[in-house]
Image (spheres, helix red, strand yellow):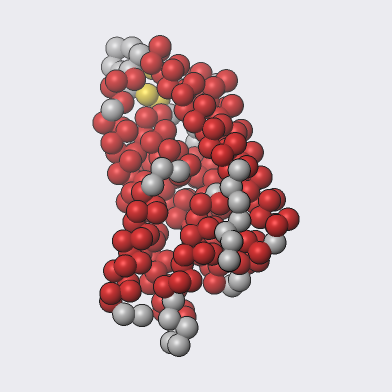
Amino acid sequence: MTLDTLLLYSVVAFFYITSPGPAIFLAITNGLRADLEIVAISSFANILGLLILSSASILGLGALIMASAALFIIVKSIGALYLIYLGIKFIRNNRAINVDREIGKIARVKTKKEYFKEAFFLAVTNPKPILFFTAIFPQFLNYKIAILPQFLTMTSIFMFISFFSLLSYGFIAKKSQKLLANVTRIQWFHRISGAVFIAMGFALFQMKRAQN
C-alpha cells in the first residue's frame, strides 16, 4: 500500500465517518444527557464494534452478509428495530434527564455499563459501517502484499477518526447543554431525539444491499 493510497483512504474514511448517522447522533445525545466521560465510554464501545465489523469483513463474514439477502435483512432489521426501540425509549422516559433548575446540570441516571452496551450494540448492528467494510474497505487493499499489516493500519485509522469524531460531536453538544437547562426544552429534546432515532430506524428498513 502506497502513501497516496493510504491518504486517499483516510480522506474517504473521514467523510464517511463524519456524515450523519446513528453513532454520531447517539454521541450528541450523550453529550447533552450526560458528560464527556460517558461520551468517551460510548465512543470506545463504538470503535470496538467497528473493530469486530472490520475483522468480520476480512474474514469474509461481511461479504457473506452482503451477498446473502436473508442475512442482510436479519442484520438490517435488528439494527433498525434497535434504533426504533431507542427512539420510543427517549420519547416515553422523560425522567431519564433530571434537571436541577438552580445550577442547570443534567444528572446521569444510567450506569456506565448501560451506556457502553447501548453504543456497542448500535455499532455492530448498524449497516452503515457494514457497507463500508464490505464495499469500500477492500478497494484500498493491495492483495499482492501481506493483508494483515494493511488491515491493522487501515482499521486503526478508521477507529481513530471515529473515536475523535464522536468525542468532538459530544463535546460540541455538551457546550450547548445550557440551552437545554430547563424542563420544557429537555422534554422537547427527548421528543426530537426519539423521533430522529425512529426515523433512522425506518430508513434502515429501506436500505438495500450493495450491488456488484
Above-or-below relation of 126 to 193: below
Above-or-below relation of 149 to 192: below
Please identify the quadrant where the N terminus is shown: bottom left
Q: Is residue 203 visible?
A: yes
Query: In percent of the image, x 36 and y 60: which residue is there?
Result: 12
Task: Give 178 or 20, whichever is nearer the viewer.
Answer: 20
Query: In percent of the image, x 65 and y 51: which residue is there?
Result: 75
Above-or-below relation of 103 to 120: above
Q: How many marks?
A: 0
Q: Residue furthest bottom?
A: 144
Task: Give 199 or 211, whichever is nearer the viewer.
Answer: 211
Residue 155, image quadrant: bottom left
Q: Is residue 114 visible?
A: no
x%, y% of residue 64? 65, 66
Please identify the quadrant where the C terminus is shown: bottom right
Query: In percent of the image, x 36 and y 49: which residue is there?
Result: 18
x%, y% of residue 55? 53, 67
Q: Residue furthest right?
A: 70
Query: In percent of the image, x 35 and y 14: which residue is there?
Result: 182
x%, y% of residue 128? 51, 52
Residue 121 placement, left or right of 172? right
Task: Give 183 or 19, whichever is nearer the viewer.
Answer: 19
